[in-house]
Image (cartoon, grey):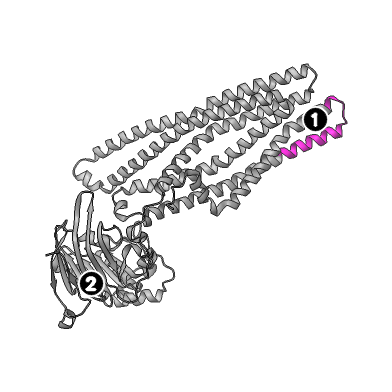
Amino acid sequence: MRETRPSPLRLLWHESRPVRPVAAGALAVLMVSVLATLAGPWLVQYFVNRATSGSAQSVLISVALCYLAAAVVAGAARIWASYLAVRAGWRIADSLRGRLLRHTAVERPVLEVESRPVGEILEQVEGNANIVGKAIAESGFRMLSNIALAIGTVVAMSVVVPAAGLAITVLVVAVCFLLTRLARRSVRRWEKAREQQASLFGFVGDSLSARDDLLLARESDWATERTRTGLESLLRTEGRAYISGRAFWPLTQLCFAVAFGLGFGFGLWQLEAGVISLGTLTMIYLYVDLLQRPLEEMSSQFGQLQQMLAVLRTASRRLGPAEPTKAAAAPGGRRELPEGPLEVAFENVSFGYGDTQVLGDVSFTVAPGRSLGIVGPTGAGKSTVVNLLCGLAEPGGGRVLIGGVEVGRLAPAQFAERVTVLSQRAHVFSATVRENITLFDASVPVERVWEVLERLNAADRIRALPEGLETRVGAGARELSDGEMQILAGARALTRPYSLLIVDEAASRFDPETEQAWAEMLDTVMRDRTVVMVEHRTGALRGVDRIMTMESGRIKEITDVGATGDDAGHPAALTRGGNR
């Protein structure tokens, strides 16, 4: 049975799993606060009745001390519950943040992610998680407390003055019905506002990245004006959403005013009839007055909760079950890779975006431990071959296999352990050299890192850094040269026993001297592995066994470069089919 998309409340319930004990504790403490607060008017009634009947001073003092104790308990419970609510709220936000980030960075196709501005993605992850955390910490638990307090007040009123309690109950139910209808409209408007805000953040991020180009082209004013108009549009959308939410305030004030009139009016009538005492009338007044605070707080808390619901609705759509890939859905499920270097095979593979075909009937095989270079002009389909090989896209037809296993059937963890990619887009994290080489894997021993650097003839260069492997690099720290970037990329590839190496136009931005150093490093990295290397120029393909030239999404020719006669007769040698 196909999994259904989680509702916003189901998503919230799922993300609360790590903190449910804390949340339960916060609710329990809040209920203590509610009970202590509801006990206050009853103690006042008892005090007034005893005072008017001439009870002893010691009795009155005892009742007054009980009232003081109840107030202290209620206040302390509210403070403790607020602390627990903050802990629960932000831990739920962290859980949602991690799930959204994993969904974006790992589970979604990279091509889809790269098609969206970074600022937009960050806002949809970080901004949405912050809204959820703040709403739960500041309003979520307090809203439940206020609802319980309002229900307790109405119940107490119903016990003392049944007619007034019934009338107030009907009033509160009617107001809640109206608020629910208004909330739906407000949530939709907050959803639209969040979408606009994410889009605006994406544009601002792109503008900052293109700052130098905009300044040289004298178009910085255009970016500023575009941002200003975006902010104005966002302000109008958020204003409408805010006004929709603030409609709760006049409704709650009207509810309180009518409830006060009903409660106190019935109370005076029954006091005059001699049915209730002065103390009971005082209690009625206090209970009705007590209803004002939760109603007023709920009117403001509902605004935050509407934003949270809008965020959760957006997140539930984003996190909804993705369609399984053809390979993953096929019988057999996940498959294991064989040991050693891995064979690569494309079997009559086609791929396209909509009606535009990018690859057509591409077939080739790279035997285990051999190497293939792929060249061709821009738009020939080279990068698409890499994306299909990395599982970043799914073929429209045919099969892509690594080690005899369709890429879609490989578990992501196993793929990461056996396949590595060297790219001109290799990222340098704001971290230490060691962390950049091991990609934050603490299980990789330092000795292994130094062994790899020795193989790359780079150990002395790293030792010469101010703090060696612990030197911080990246944004806000030491900038790396192209040569140092090569060292990091090569060390990453050698640190683990990868079986397949994919080199994606890694030398395209190097000068001749740097390109020579890169080629020498590749000679080391390519040993004992299957290698697929993509470059714009044939001259950058050094040390490969064969070169495959692509043109217009098809294989134009395959040239034997470095294979011996024995290689040529190898049963798993590189082959090509259906592209002449």
Is 393 or 198 nearer to us in this picture? 393
* Mark 2 residue element: strand
Q: Is residue 467 visible?
A: no
In the picture of the structure, the residue carrying the numbered disc 2 is 366
Which residue is rendered at x = 43% and y = 46% of the image?
Answer: 316
* Mark 1 residue element: helix
Which residue is rendered at x = 70% and y = 42% of the image?
Answer: 73
Which residue is rendered at x = 15% and y = 61% of the image?
Answer: 554
Q: State the predominant SS element of the stretch in magenta.
A: helix
Residue 144 location in percent, x, y?
A: 59, 39
Q: Is residue 530 above or below residue 128?
A: below
When asked about the image quadrant of residue 78, the answer is top right
In the picture of the structure, the residue carrying the numbered disc 1 is 47
Q: Amino acid at mark 2?
A: Val
Residue 216 location in percent, x, y?
A: 19, 45
Q: Is residue 499 above or below residue 148?
A: below
When asked about the image quadrant of residue 187, the answer is top left
Which residues are drawn in magenta? 51-71
Q: Is residue 130 left or right of residue 169?
A: left
